[in-house]
Image: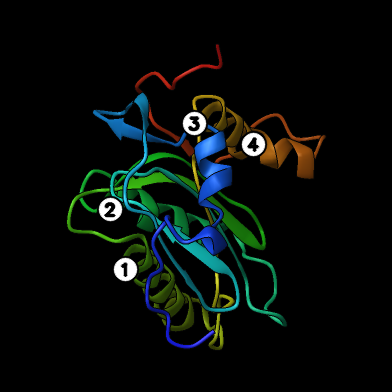
Amino acid sequence: MGSPAARRASDPACGSADLAARGGLPVRRGGRTKGVAMGDIERYRRHLPHWRMDGATYFVSWHLHRGQVELAPAERDLVLRSLVYYNDKHFLLFAAVVLDDHVHMLLQPLAGHALEQIMHSRKGSTSRQLVREHGRTAPVWQGEYFDRIIRNEADFPEKYRYIVENPLRRWPEIREYRWLWVRSEPVPQES
């Protein structure tokens, strides 16, 4: 495929017809979804495809590297603290959950902070801390992460609910989960 140079949404290979058919992508302002806007969409690929659009909100997941043991409670605390610390500094965090072997986030990068920079920073920082403070060996996280642009008004509450309900789906017997963080302001609901 060549260099990871961005391809614009006007390129049919980027799936722009499908995005346009869905009514475009939501733009989030002030913590609420405000309409739908088609902006310049950039696409690049490592092992997974990554789509970028200014002002977009993303659902992101990443996993422990193969061979790593599950995250202990203190390690989950460390990862969640790292995500919450940068909320409202580098990104707006709407929901996050740290499970024993993976992490999910629903976030919107703030101006001047690209999602790939945020992910590099959070995965790198937590990896170094986990190695230094908990005796893990590197690499801690898989090199890639999955990201998805929130595409419409129904997509945001669906992904939000997925994050909030993820621990219960994994462990049906639990009643609460301390490694779940949700924004205290209202979240848009499905119509």
Point out the frontmost of discs 2 and 4. 4
Where disc 4 sits, the SS reads helix
Q: Amino acid at mark 2?
A: Tyr
Give residue 117's mark.
1
Q: Earlier in the sequence, mark 3 or mark 4?
A: 3
Name the residue carrying label 2: 86
Residue at mark 3 to residue at mark 2: CA–CA distance: 31 Å
Label 2 neighbour load within 10 Å: few <14, some 14-19, many 20+ = some
Seen at 32% across and 52% down, the residue is 40
Left or right: where does residue 88 sit relative to residue 153? left
Residue at mark 2 to residue at mark 1: CA–CA distance: 12 Å
Q: Earlier in the sequence, mark 1 or mark 4?
A: 1
Residue 126 in the image: state x and y as whole percent: 42, 70
Seen at 26% across and 30% down, the residue is 29
Residue 87 in the image: state x and y as whole percent: 29, 46
Name the residue carrying label 4: 162
Question: 75 or 153, which is in the foreground?
Answer: 153
Residue at mark 1 to residue at mark 3: CA–CA distance: 28 Å
Q: Please, is residue 179 above or below residue 118 in the view?
A: above
